[in-house]
Amino acid sequence: MKKILSLFFVITYLCTSMVFAMEPLKGSVTETDKYTPQESELFTGKVETLNRKDIIHMTVSQVLDSSVSMEGDEFFAEVTGDVYGNKGIIIPKGTIAHGTLVNTTAAKRLGRAASLTLTFDYLVTPDGREIPIEGKMTTKLHPVAEAGKIIAQDVGYTAVGGALGGLAALQWFGLEAAIASHGYTIAGGAAVGGAIGLGAALIRKGNEVMIAPGDQIKVKINTSVDLPVYKEEALKKEEILYDGLTININEIKHEKDPFGETNTITLTLLISNLSDKTLSGFDMALINDYGVKFSPSIFGSTKLMFKQVKPGDRLIADVSFTVDNINRSFWLTFFDRRTGKDITKISLDNAYKKLSKKSRKRIEKVRSAKVKKNFKKEDDFMNMDF
C-alpha cells in the first residue's frame, strides 16, 4: 500500500511540474526616455542632456588608413576631456567609444583626396556604464570647400608652370629676342609652361588620409541622450601623498617647443617640505596613464630641475615637461633616490579642476587648437622610387 501511495504522489508531482513548465513566465519591462540616477557615491542625482549636434573630442586607439583599412572595420576611441553640461560633468575623460569605419574613398585624379567616415554607437564610462549614442566624424571636406581647394592648387600648378616657362624662354632666346618680339617669346614660353602645369594638375592624384593614435578628432553627436551628472569627488584620480610633504599645482600651461609643436606642459608648483626627504629635480617626472615617464625639459624653466628641496624648505617654482600628447592624464611624481619607489604622485587632472575658470578656458582653447584638420598621410620614404 505504501508503495502504491508513493508512486501516486510521484506521478502527481511530475504532472504538476510539466503543467507549470508549459506555461510561460509572465513579467513586464518598463522603458523610460529619461534615466533617473539614484543618489550614490558617483552621481549628484541631477540629469543633463547630451544634445544633438554637441561635439566630443576623442583620439583613436589604432591607425585608420584610407589605403589599408576596410569598410566595416571596428575600432575604439577615447574621450580626451571631460564633457560638461550646465550642472556638471556628464561624460568623464577616459570614456571609451566604440566606432566603425563605414565609408572609405580612394584618392583620385584632379587632386581629390581620399576620405574616411567613422560612426560611433556607444560609450563605456570608467565606472562601467554603457551609453548608446549616434556619432559621426569624417575627413571629407564639404564639396564646395574641396572644389575651392582643388582649384586653388591647380591654379598654383598652372602659375608655377607659366613662370618656369617664361624663364626658360628668356634663357633660351635671350633678352634681345624678347625685346625684338615685344615679349612674345616670353609669353609663348609662359603659355607652354602653363599648359604643362595644367596637364600636371589634371593628372595629379590626391593624398591618402590616415588617423593615428594621438590625433585629436571631433565627433558630432546626432542624437539626444539623458545622462546623470557626476560628483566632482567621484572623478578624482588616485594620488600618493607623503607625510609632511605638500605639493600644490597652482597653474598649468600648454606651450610650444622651439620647433613650434604644442607638446610642453609647464607647471607652477608650491612645495612645502616638512618631511624627512630631500627632493631633487632629477628625481622628478611626469607619468601618463600608460606608465610612460617624461623628465623635465631643458626647453622650459630649469630652476627646479637643478635645485634641491631640503627638509624645511618652501618655494614656488616652474618646471616644464615635453610630452607625446598633452591631452593624456598625467601625474607629477617624485621618486626615492635610493629605492626608486614613488614618494608622491599628484594628479594633473585633479589640479586642473581646481584652477580658475579663466585658466581652464585658456587650456581648453589650446587643446581645441590641437584637433587635427589635415589628415594627409605622409609618404613613406622607404617606399619611394628613386
Image (spheres, rainbow, N blue to C red):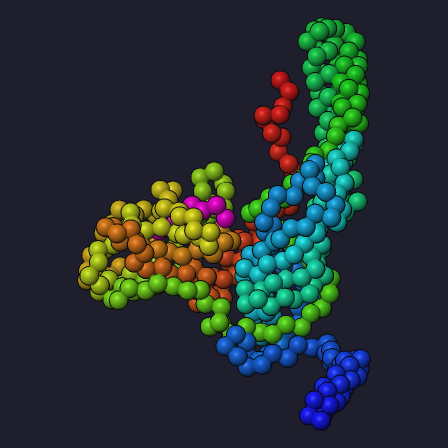
Percent position (x, y) of residue 120?
A: 69, 57
Which residue is at a point 26% across and 52% down the rendered structure image? 339
Which residue is at a point 38% across and 42% down the rendered structure image? 299
Percent position (x, y) of residue 97?
A: 63, 58
Mark yes or no: residue 305 visible. Answer: yes
Is residue 255 a member of the stretch shown in magenta?
Answer: no
In the image, farthest residue toward the bottom: 1
Specify the segment rendered in magenta: 319-325
Percent position (x, y) of residue 242?
A: 28, 64
Name above or below for residue 161 compared with residue 39.
above
The answer to whether 191 appears left or right of 372 in the picture is right
The answer to whether 236 appears left or right of 121 in the picture is left
Name above or below for residue 298 compared with residue 6.
above
Which residue is at a point 76% across and 40% down the rendered structure image? 105
Q: Quadrant of residue 126?
A: bottom right
Is residue 321 a member of the stretch shown in magenta?
Answer: yes
Name above or below for residue 167 compared with residue 359.
above
Name above or below for residue 29 compared with residue 169.
below
Mark yes or no: residue 26 visible. Answer: no
Given residues 53 and 136, the one toward you in this image is: 136
On-image quarter of the C terminus:
top right
On-image quarter of the N terminus:
bottom right
Given residues 97 and 352, the one toward you in this image is: 97
Count of picture labels: 0
In the image, farthest residue toward the front: 1
Percent position (x, y) of residue 212?
A: 60, 44
Which residue is at a point 75% across and 35% down the rendered structure image? 107
The answer to whether 283 appears left or right of 110 in the picture is left
